[in-house]
Image (spheres, rainbow, N blue to C red):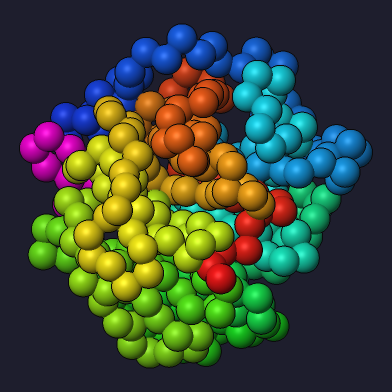
Amino acid sequence: MTDRAKLFCTGACAALLLSGCSGGTSRGTPALPASGNATARHGWISPLAKKMKLLYVTDYTASIVLIYKQGATGAGPVGEIVNGIDQPQGNAVDKSGTLYVANEGNNTVTEYTLGSTDPSVTLSTNISRPLDVSVDSTGIVYVMDSSAGQILEFKPGSTSPDATVTISHPVDAVNAKNNDLYVTYNASSAGHVAVCKPLATTCTDLGISVGLAQGIAIDLHGHLLVGDVYGQVIDIYKRGATTPFRTISVHYEQPSKLALDKKDATLYMADPANFAVDLFNYKAGTLASSFTFGSADELEGVALAPGQKPGK
């Protein structure tokens, strides 16, 4: 079980996540064939991938970033990245298509320009076991450093943090259209959400409280999606609200990381407790499909290229 899963995890949550570590619930979804094993190729991207809408999935167990065509669940990856990758957690893609990966295993964030399998930039200063990364439209990189209880903010070109926020166990984050950072964090045995201005040194709690907060996303209407591991739901909040106006059930699943496609049609959810990525019909709130990679690979992060531009 990763550090992300262990945060404040007791009782029913522990039973849920431990069941995932022994195989989770039965989905009837076969693992990809042995030909999809990344270790034999040491990083590759199909030439066709440059013309595709892509889904990046971080595989914590095998230290790989798997690259899929958006919406595809059975054909296997069209690419993979292993160079610089070490127990990857969250990931993000900026407006130019550059991929950012938070590597818990080697305390770095690595950046990959579109189509590359080698990192163009590696951030490491003051980073310790990062759980997620986000990047705003100006290129500021935000690193969720949960073990140190802080958010590190790097301006474009900086190799040392330009600002630091002290916050209890930050887990996941997403930037809104106005570049504000929304972050899930866990304190006092409960999950919360805060909003931070770019390069701020403090954040404002939004008054949202859940059992154990993990994945977070913002839809095209500016609604906030928050994954609650204890509640086994994704709560959806209108702007400024502290009570969800709708929920998506993720029974016996771990809503670890969330991403919406460009039209809010499909919600992608990393579910490391069941070694899977789930695709939901976002409007209906129903599970559309699911896929795995290996029989016990913890898939921790999902990021889309291109993704939607959240908020109005």
> In the image, what residue occupies the spot 43% across and 30% down?
286
> In the image, what residue occupies the spot 22% across and 51% down?
212
Q: Quadrant of residue 296?
A: top left
What segment is highlighted magenta in the picture?
A: 3-13
Q: Main secondary structure of the magenta part?
A: helix
> In the image, what residue occupies the spot 68% across and 28% down?
72
Side (left or right) of 166 relative to 122: left
- Which quadrant of the figure contains the C terminus? bottom right
Q: Position of residue 144 (x, y in %)?
A: 42, 67
Side (left or right) of 50 relative to 72: right
Q: Quadrant of residue 183?
A: bottom left
Q: Position of residue 78 (x, y in %)?
A: 77, 32
Instruction: Please tell me whether residue 11 belongs to the stretch shown in magenta.
Output: yes
Q: Is residue 55 above or below residue 144?
A: above
- Total label count? 0
Q: Position of residue 307 (x, y in %)?
A: 65, 54
Instruction: Please tell me whether residue 32 belongs to the stretch shown in magenta.
Output: no
Q: Is residue 24 above or below residue 125?
A: above
- Residue lying furthest right: 47
Side (left or right) of 79 relative to 220: right
> In the image, what residue occupies the spot 53% across and 68% down?
311
User: Does the rendering let one see residue 147?
Assistant: no
Given residues 211 and 176, the one toward you in this image is 176
Q: Is residue 32 above or below residue 311?
A: above
Q: Quadrant of residue 134?
A: bottom right
Q: Position of residue 10 (x, y in %)?
A: 11, 42
Given residues 119 and 298, the one toward you in this image is 298
